[in-house]
Image (cartoon, rainbow, N blue to C red):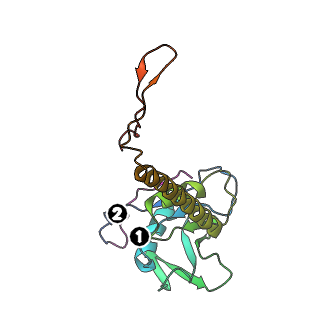
Amino acid sequence: MTATIPFTPAVGGRAPSSLPLRLTLARAGAPPALIDGAWWPRSRNLTEELPALVEWLDPLWGRITRIAVSRTLWPVIPGEVPAHGHMVGVGWSNAGQDPHKLLLLSHTFGRWDLLVIPPETARATAARLMATATDPSRSLTATGLIHEAERFRAAAEAAADSDSLREAVWDSEGGHDAPHPASRTPDGPVTRHVPTTAAGV
């Protein structure tokens, strides 16, 4: 299946949301994996979030008949939600299901597993998760992907903090203000070393 993100469905005669569905799916022919794509809902309200997801997936995966979620991430889980003129049952489990995974069942094509990216996730981290969840070499579980993204984010923040610390030390020692001594190159011209900054900074 082609990776897809923008989609504004209308469900049950309601006006479609002005916000696109944030969804990406593994491409058709991709090797089997533990995750078939990633979904980044805008809230933890499944009653509002699930109909748009099912409306989009029904034509691709056949009529969705059942959804299973982990109770860990959702404060309220509806017994069913409307989509494409039919009702889809929603089940849950306290144990045995990856808390960051959503299962969708279809009588026609079987089962699909989506990584659920928490709504409050930063955009850069969510983009990384969406790309990783559909990478042909993907082999991690949903929670494994979340943990990997968190480690990457923490490492990036640590690197940024380290750069800021080095710059602060440089400033405190007069690094930006102290004139550098003139030097003469082998060919003779005088040059002055001036710290440069990255473009756009």
Disc 1 crowd, CA 10 A, few/some/many (<14, 14-19, 20+): some
Q: Secondary structure at mark 2?
A: loop
Q: Secondary structure at mark 1?
A: loop
Viewer-side residue, 82 vs 48: 48
Q: Is residue 55 magenta?
A: no
Asked if the residues shown at circle 2 and circle 1 are in contact, with their CB atoms under 8 angstroms apart, the answer is: yes
Q: Is residue 186 visible?
A: yes
Instruction: Answer left or right for 199 relative to 145.
Output: left
At 56% from the left and 76% from the top, the residue drawn is 67
For residue 42, the mark is 1
At 54% from the left and 55% from the top, the residue drawn is 159
Instruction: Answer left or right for 147 relative to 200.
Output: right
At 68% from the left and 51% from the top, the residue drawn is 137
* Amino acid at dot 1: Arg
Q: Quadrant of residue 194?
A: top left
Q: Position of residue 78 (x, y in %)?
A: 47, 85
Looking at the image, the residue that sits furthest to the front is 181
Q: Position of residue 180 (x, y in %)?
A: 42, 35
